[in-house]
Image: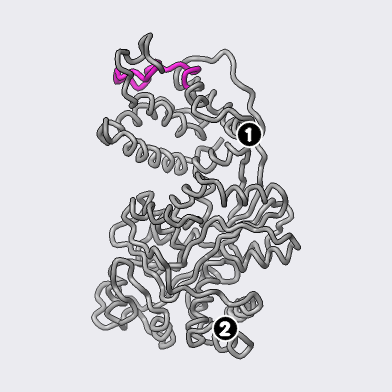
Amino acid sequence: MAVDTAREEKALRSMTERLVGDYSEVHTAEQVESVVGEVRRRFDGHTVREFVPILVERIARRELDPAPEGSEVGGENSESPRISRDGNPNSNSVHLPDIFRTTLSTLPRNRKVLAGIAVGVVAVVAVAVTATGRHATTAPAAAALTEVHGVIGSEKSDFFADPQVVDELAKHGLKVDADPAGSRQMATSTDLSKYDFAFPSSADAAERIQLARKVGAAKYTPFSSPMAIATFAPIVDLLTAAGVVTPGPTPQFDVQKFLQLAEQGKQWNQLPGNTSYAVPKNILVSTTDPRTSNSAAMFLAVTAYVANDNSTVRGGTAEDYAVSRISRLFTRQGFTEPSSDAPFKDYLANGMGPAPMVWIYEAQYVDAAAHGALKPGMVLMYPKPTTMSQHTVVPLDDKGDTLGKLLTTDPVLQQLAAEHGFRPTDQSLFTKVAAAHQVPVDADVLNSINPPDYDTFEHLLDGVAKAYS
């Protein structure tokens, strides 16, 4: 089994932050991190990794919980055995049955939940036996989970890969296997016959999937995200001086004034007083490919609205006029990615040289901030106007319907969606996450437009696609 180190590291960081908060009244952050590090080293070298974060948290909590009064740690009167503090990272003071019982004892005793947690029984036993140096005499048989196969917008890949999301779905008897694809791509060219659900990033793409597959009216929108721009502080300063950006805790990007600069063919090195990014490149917002990706289609919707005198595009004349004004915003970019994950990862890794402004889902930036992936000088900027991306589950069978309902109604999954930067049904969950990680966001996105109707949107997309050739 391949070891997904990035996923494990992310889960361990999140778990450590949670323990630091939970035990702040009795332990310093350094003490908590030391205990987690000691417990984690017990699992070094073991190839079965999926449930290591869960085991590390269970054992670390036992280590950190204050011993009951009148008892010795690990003594006869102790309610639960604990890890020894002898400093030996290979200490065997916890027995396999103790770990296993502790893991199960906190969970509800019903068949549905036990079926969910059973996905990790074999892995838990294998890792824990080796880590503690002891062997269990018996182990419960692993119950099969219901596998749900779907295709999702790539910006949701981290959410479905999150061990906490995997665990919560397993508690409900589900194991989700999700393939990433551009939302427009899954609505037009992806073979959906092998999938139980499609999870594009817009209601428009969801509608097209429903029409193409002739599926029922049932669909679910468990969370949403406004479109935004990931940029850098020097770029904000330059565009503020050029009258395109209004500065503030959440800088506002005037799409009308940007469109005027773009139509003039203005380049960065032509901006007066530019010494921070004086390069001979057109002033553009980097997007994905509008022929395959929803995020670029959302950029098209916003710019077409502005190009049409700040009104919704309707009719062939308005469509042709809008395409004539906005197609160059895409064709001048050169190569563009088919889905939204890659451009944002390039933004995080490569700085403002290749792409000083990247059109993204707000969720991507908030998620990166919450997980310590941002670098100094990175800024979240909101376009005026913007539009909301409604992440919509289209069930293709009963298993997909079960997942759609669960993502929308389960409070744990809703909280985890907020921790990945999405705005769930209860938006206060999102604002609390943003505040906790000191991410400036527009709590109420007031200046937001609705995309044009289905047929108009398709005509606009077709017009831009033709402009590429």
Residue 77 appears in the rendering: yes
Amino acid bearing label 2: Val
Which residue in the structure is indicated by mark 1?
Answer: 112
The residue depicted at 33 percent of the width and 67 percent of the height is: 250
Residue 271 pos. (x, y %)? 30, 82
Residue range highlighted in magenta: 81-99
Number of other residues with Cα within 10 Å of mark 2, as a class: few under 14, some 14 to 19, many 20 or more? many
**Nearer to us in this view, 103 or 39:** 103
Q: Quadrant of residue 198?
A: bottom right
Element type where label 1 sits in the image: helix
The residue depicted at 42 percent of the width and 79 percent of the height is: 255
Q: Quadrant of residue 358?
A: bottom left
**Nearer to us in this view, 323 or 348:** 323
Please give left or right for residue 362 compared with residue 338 in the image: left
Residue 469 appears in the rendering: no
Please give left or right for residue 439 compared with residue 452 in the image: left
Front label number (2 vs 1): 1
Name the disc covering residue 313, or none. Answer: 2
Pointer 2 or 1: first along the chain: 1
Vertical placement of residue 45 versus 382, above or below: above
Vertical placement of residue 211 versus 78, above or below: below
Contact (CB < 8 A) between labels 2 and 1?
A: no
Residue 172 pos. (x, y %)? 60, 39
Q: CA distance from mark 2 to mark 1?
A: 50 Å
- Farthest residue to the right: give it: 214
The residue depicted at 34 percent of the width and 80 percent of the height is: 244
Residue 176 pos. (x, y %)? 61, 45
Amino acid bearing label 1: Lys
Residue 385 pos. (x, y %)? 44, 76
